[in-house]
Amino acid sequence: MLIIFKELTKQFEKSLLDSLEKNDKKGEFEILRKNLITQSSKEEFGDYQCNVCLSLSKIYKKNPRDISTDLINLLNKNKSITKLCKSLEIAGPGFINIKLKDEVLINEIKSNIQCQRAGVPQIKKDLDSGLSNKVIVDFSSPNIAKEMHVGHLRSTIIGDSISRIFELRGYQVLRLNHVGDWGTQFGMLITQLKDLYSNNLEEIGNIKISDLVEFYKESKKRFDNESEFQKRSREEVVKLQSGDIKSIKAWKLLCDQSRKEFDEIYRNLKIKIEERGESFYNPFLKSVIEDLNFKKILIEDQGAKCVFLDGMTNKEGKPLPLIIQKKDGGFNYATTDLAAIRYRFNKPPDGDDASRIIYVTDHGQANHFAGVFQVAKKAKWIPDNCQVDHVPFGLVQGIDGKKLKTREGETIRLKDLLKEAVRRAKEDLLKRLEDENRYETEDFITNTSRIIGLGAVKYADLSQNRITNYQFSFDKMLSLNGNTAPYLLYTLVRIAGINRKNDFFYDSKDCQYINYEHKSEWKLIRKLLKFDEVIISIEKDLMPNRLCNYLFELCQTFNRFYDQVPILKEEKYKKISRLNLCDLTAKTLKLSLELLGIETLERM
């Protein structure tokens, strides 16, 4: 529908411009053309609506309904409009309701049936601009020697979904895991490591991540309470940063041990991501300072080098500084993030040649990234026509509205949460099989439980507006009713069931006899044709919950269609038409669930 919408908008703009020129008001065009055509507020009003006549009434000093009549007369003289529209009708105080012709919608449906992407267009590379089509999505980002917890869940699955959507559109996507693998905490960890395994550092390879987490806690305890250990830890940081062989070896062992655990979770969640830790940018930190100094952006304040940010103030109302280099000469997160942003936009071989960078982190880092982006823009490290976005998200809460934790008050480990989701999905499935007196193999039960459990967790998160906190409830997310992954999967299974019962062969590419007349068919057609608009909107505002809301409505619309019209018992051409709608619904659902990182089922 996106192509139709663009063509409709273009033709309405022509008629609007004609009207303004006749009334010597051409200067108002740029303001009035914004949101000239919008989705209809209710289906019964039509496909789209135009509300510009209400604004024109103030400019022309005329009744808006009279202006609507004049505009419709202009529009009806436009052959492109008459080719697309069944009717243009005045409603209320002067709205124009737009109904598209049936054959226009049917032709779009035929096109989507034959399209692998269910009608979603791919981008065309603009060779004239010189910009690449590479998008970097920075997400997940756990810390070495710490287990991934529920707080990493949102970043990981939101970032993965955004990456998949951009890939579908034809962008070259680089998924980066900006792992916390550097910094002062490693001095503490390496010192503890050398104290415990001084004879053979290779023994760390036998330590499991759960032990490594305890190891981190013990190291921190010693750092906070033993001045001699703290002194040696600080010296170890200097050794590490200067490339001491033993220190580097210990650091690598710690990183490798943590990576095994991260990789297990990524495999379980089907997450593809390329690790590029903070340490990657170490060689570029010094030149960040030099470049900012050269451009006269850095200011020394109380021994630290910083940039005072425009429009950002502290509690006293004074300009807020972003510290780039500490007074002891050390670097921090801001230095690393600035080095990363410069490298990612730079051309090869000194960079990634990105045209857009998307950072998926919790809402608490919003001010940090606002400051980093501002400094990068001042330094002109973000090229013209390129874009940086921070994708913030809220907390995962328990049903009590508090931060999700274990009974002991500990942060919930991500792998434990995922195991529990699969266990509960299996419990529900076994109960259903017992109620239905149905036998399934152990492989079927294991695989189905895994897909439903993990899919439920992902969907429960992605279906929320990412900016807000949300309450985590296994009971809600595993329900077969409501806006949940099991409900969507059940709809897909229902369509698979129709296909299993169908003994009539038809070629879905042969669309010449497709036709529709029932109200529920038209509702399903219109909903299916909105898919491309939803995907394009997410590309702009990076809100995956739009796709979840759409899928829930699509499934509701399909299930009403299924209840209201016969499919397999109809005569030949009606059967072909309705089976094609089933196929397109299944294709749209499968593709969309794939975009959300959720596997699908033929039976459940």
Image: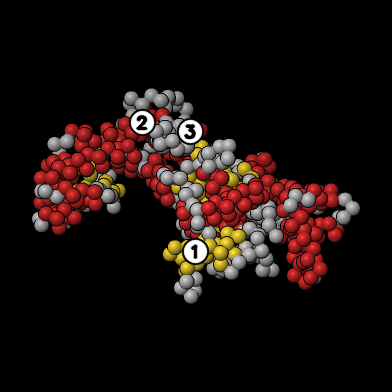
- Marks 2 and 3 close (CB-CB < 8 Å): no
Residue at the spot 18% in from the left edge and 33% down from the top edge = 79
Q: Does label 2 or label 3 sit earlier along the sequence?
A: 2
The answer, for residue 74, to whether it is visible in the render is yes
Q: Mark 3 points at which residue?
A: 499
Q: Where is residue 486 in the image (x, y as percent from the top left)?
A: 53, 49
Q: As displayed, is residue 224 above or below residue 560?
A: below
Q: As displayed, is residue 590 above or below residue 42?
A: above
Q: Mark 1 points at which residue?
A: 308
Q: Nearer the viewer, residue 77 or 257?
A: 257
Residue 12: which quarter of the image? top left
The label shown at residue 478 is none
Q: Name the residue under label 2.
A: 110
Q: Position of residue 167 (x, y in %)?
A: 50, 38
Look at label 3 and name its amino acid: Asn
Work out which quarter of the rendered image holds the C terminus and state it: top right
